[in-house]
Image (spheres, grey):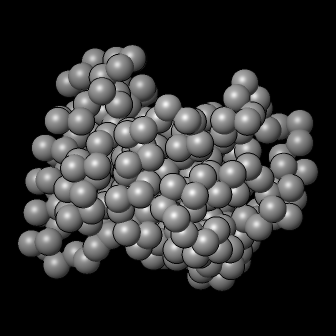
Amino acid sequence: MLIDSHCHLQDERFDPDREEMLARARQAGVTAFVVVGWDLPSSQKAVDLADDHSDVYAVIGIHPHFASSFNRKTVRALKKMALSAKVVAIGETGLDFYRNLSPRPDQEKAFLAQLELAGELRLPVVVHSRNADQETWAILQEYSRQAISQGRSFPLGQMHCFAGDLPLALCYVEHGFLISIPATCTYPNNRRLHTVAKGIALRWLTVETDAPYLPPQGRRGQRNEPSYLPETVSAMAQLRGEDYQKVARGTALAAAWLFGIGTIGGER
């Protein structure tokens, strides 16, 4: 039982062998795939892919790299896509002050607008944060307070490909956000992520490939894909001193809880 809680299977790098890639992942034990958009076209492709496969679910939104294109028409388009029952979250949205491909004010505006949309639709949010720990935390702390005042229940979202330290991770958990562990936890020198993977209760952890990005240690330089997810789970199990099946099941249940999907592909 495995759920890839964040992947980009609509990416053109999967065009030559998408069905074969999905078959390999299912054979490896992956029972559900959460496919995440980064702009309007990729979000629509995520929805289309989810409509074609019972074990695929879609997340729709605008990545901070493309925040400068965000406007009222974007919100209307996302609302229309969200009519699909296979849409399980808004994102990935957030802040990226490492590359700054969109001006920071535009990133913050798009982030806040998508948080508002997620609240309106009662959907979780998938958050990207890079070199913006303080700013992202300030926004999400206030978002959590507002959500609680509106009677919303946890979890509120996922911190995708988490790169912060354990104290920050625990703060997010306290405010209703799951921490998503990528394959970078297989990297021997990534001690900060190792500490996070060991220090958070399984109920609050998901695993992801972020495919086609961030392959595990033994496959660096290759295209990442969901069939490699067991390598991340194995690394987590070793770090935590727990059985592989316990970690696989725990992270799958956490993803199912977050996104409102079944732990077996096709169930909901």
Q: Nearer the viewer, residue 16 or 205?
A: 205
Residue 200 in the image: state x and y as whole percent. 35, 62
Quarter of the image where the N terminus is located:
bottom right
From this view, report whether residue 185 is shown above or below residue 98: below
Q: Quadrant of residue 3?
A: bottom right
Q: Nearer the viewer, residue 181 or 83?
A: 181
Apparent side of residue 250 relative to residue 28 in the rendered image (left or right)? left
Which residue is pictured at 79% across the width and 57% down the height?
25
Q: Nearer the viewer, residue 122 or 201?
A: 201
Total number of numbered labels? Answer: 0
From this view, report whether residue 201 is shown above or below residue 179: below
Quarter of the image where the C terminus is located:
bottom right
Residue 233 in the image: state x and y as whole percent. 61, 58
From this view, report whether residue 21 is shown above or below residue 249: above
From this view, report whether residue 86 is shown above or below residue 192: below
Residue 5, can we see it? no
Q: Residue furthest front?
A: 241
Q: Nearer the viewer, residue 248 or 19?
A: 248
Apparent side of residue 179 relative to residue 106 in the rendered image (left or right)? right
Residue 107 in the image: state x and y as whole percent. 28, 30
Residue 261 in the image: state x and y as whole percent. 55, 76
Which residue is pictured at 60% across the width and 80% down the height?
262
Which residue is pictured at 83% across the width and 37% down the height?
15
Which residue is pictured at 57% across the width and 62% down the height?
237
Residue 186, can we see it? yes
